Image (cartoon, helix red, strand yellow):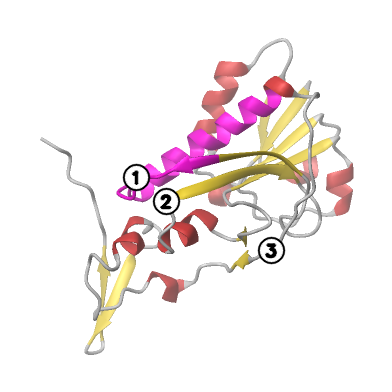
Amino acid sequence: MKITFLLDKTNNWIEPYVENFINTYKSYKYDLKINFNHETVKSNEIVFILGYTKILDEKFLNSNKLNLVIHESALPKGKGFSPVQWQILNGQKEITFTLFEAKKELDSGDIFLQNNVLFSGYELFDEIRDIQGKKTMELIEIFLNSYPIINKRPQLGQDSVFQRRKLNDDKLDINKSIKEQFNHLRIANNDEYPLWFEIDGNKYTIKIFKEENE
């Protein structure tokens, strides 16, 4: 069975989790590969599209038997960008991971699997990403262990869309306490998108780290 993980070099945090999965689960049943260019991916039984940022047209989708995406919300609620960050920022601890079929319309395909993750409320960005990566691969494993005898269902209910996060979304409010903004601190990417604030015309950057328990 020819299976490709379509990843993006500009958003490749998931790659180590995929590599570990391939090393663990490669067998005579699966021909597992990673690819970073959708134009060279065709005639696959399954393509798992993970964090890929380029637009995929109908030609690509039709060139493989099944194209799957994992999105971290209870679709059709929470379509769009950075769903984990937006939900944690909104105070949500239990987040649904959805494995669904890729379609041309944004996050609109039929659902195969949904599984929840309960966060403690104290994880920081790297810990959140680690949980996200492990849960993603867990869903893929469940799917492959059931495929092709696995049902899908259409998305039902009212949809909503998270917008792409921008620079101002990483701005702290100096008039609010740390406790009030703790979820904002938790989702901060110290390396790529650190939090910042302004006071009297001066701009400052804040990075957060968790102290290890002694």
Q: Position of residue 191 (x, y in %)?
A: 36, 55
Q: Earlier in the sequence, mark 2 or mark 1?
A: 2
Residue type, mark 1 in image: Ser
State yes or no: residue 133 in magenta.
yes
Q: What stretch of residues is rendered in magenta?
A: 116-144
Residue type, mark 3 in image: Asp
Q: Earlier in the sequence, mark 1 or mark 3?
A: 1
Image vertical order of residue 110 relative to residue 162, above or below: above
Report crowding for label 3: few under 14, some 14 to 19, many 20 or more residues within 10 A (C-alpha): few
Residue at image position (87%, 52%) is 58
Kind of element beneath mark 2: loop
Image vertical order of residue 186 relative to residue 180, above or below: above
Is 45 situated left or right of 159 in this image? right
Q: Earlier in the sequence, mark 3 or mark 2?
A: 2
Instruction: Give the residue number, with chain letter if any, for mark 2.
Output: 93
- Residue 30 visible in this rendered orientation of the protein: yes
Instruction: Give the residue number, with chain letter if any, for mark 1.
Output: 120
Classify the position of the N terminus by image quarter.
Answer: top right
- Give yes or no for contact between labels 2 and 1 (Cβ–Cβ under 8 Å): yes
Disc assigned to residue 50: none
Report crowding for label 2: few under 14, some 14 to 19, many 20 or more residues within 10 A (C-alpha): some
Of all residues shown, which one is farthest toward the front?
A: 157
Is 2 situated left or right of 210 in this image? right
Q: CA distance from mark 1 to mark 3?
A: 27 Å
Instruction: Give the residue number, with chain letter if any, for mark 3.
Output: 159
Residue type, mark 2 in image: Lys
Classify the position of the C terminus by image quarter.
Answer: top left
